[in-house]
Amino acid sequence: MPSICDIINELQLLFHLTLVSKDNRRDTVVEQTAVVNAINFSKFISYSPYNSATVEKLLGNYNEKPKISSLIELANALENFNNDSLLKFPRLYVQETSTNNWVNLLYPETVKYLLKEVAMIKQEIIENPALQSLARTLRYFIRERKYGYADDIRNARKDSRDFEETIAKMLREGRLRLEQEEKIHLPTDEEMKEVFRLANEDFENTKTALVILAFSFPSKAEEEQTVEVQHEV
């Protein structure tokens, strides 16, 4: 029996999504609409159960509204390989799927797909230990719902000092948090030199990988390393 993804791949289907609400007079009001190419989503979904679970969270259910803003950016990234949309998607996903008591991040497997298959970033950048180390620091602030550092890095231009200055500011705050006995990982000086070397060679892909990696759940090994660093300090 073919799966629904196999069937969709053979057809030209579009999903029309509409988010509606009731106004003060109880009239139905259309808040947002989106038209999504089903083929792009079917390839994304069929690649991994983690991708499928990601889309499921965005589509909502009887009790939860669909996350239209996230769906639009994800669709644009998958269909047009739009890097701006790819960078906006993780931020929107985290904001729209988190609750008051829980910050929901992207699955690492989904992040790897987005970086490798959509952004087409080299494996050497994605898996660079120094870049992953800095992403762990940025992830700390994202989990604190402090998105400013991620936003500033995302919007940084190669012809400015925004990238370096934002990272320096983040690390200064990170050191203060560490002095206050917060459980935060900080990269070494050598790791920072490596990150800036990567940025000099391939600024856009380094920036993209850093931001998107930070919006993903850490691996168990990363969590254990963070605890070990605290004990050493």
Image (spheres, rainbow, N blue to C red):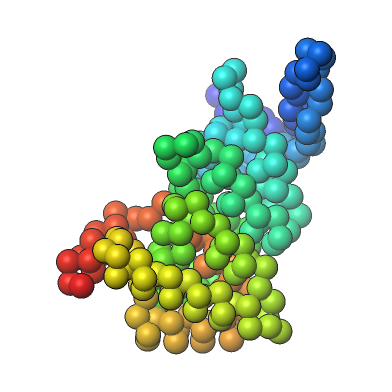
Q: Nearer the viewer, residue 194 or 99?
A: 99
Q: Residue at x 29, y 70 (%)?
A: 179
Q: Is residue 96 left or right of residue 231?
A: right
Examine the rendered structure and indicate whether residue 34 appears above or below residue 112.
Answer: above
Q: Residue at x 29, y 60 (%)?
A: 183
Is residue 174 shown left or right of residue 178? right
31 is higher (above) or lower (below) than 147: above
* Image quarter in which the C terminus is found: bottom left
Up-down relation of residue 192 to residue 45 (above or below): below
Q: Is residue 90 above or below residue 196?
A: above
Q: Quadrant of residue 25?
A: top right
Name the residue at the left extreme.
231
Quadrant of the rendered image containing residue 186: bottom left
Residue 78 percent location from the top left of the image? 68, 50
The x and y percentages for residue 187 are: 37, 75
Nearest to the observer: residue 204 or residue 117: 204
Residue 232 placed where, x, y %? Answer: 17, 72
| Residue 52 image offset from top left, x and y in percent | 53, 37
Which of the two residues, 228 or 146, is positioned nearer the viewer here?
146
State left or right for residue 146 relative to residue 140. Answer: right
Residue that appears at 49% across and 36% down: 99
The answer, for residue 108, to whether it is visible in the render is no
Q: Is residue 197 visible?
A: yes
Q: Look at 58% across and 52% down and name the residue there.
A: 90
**Count of numbered circles on the image:** 0
Which image quadrant: the N terminus? top right
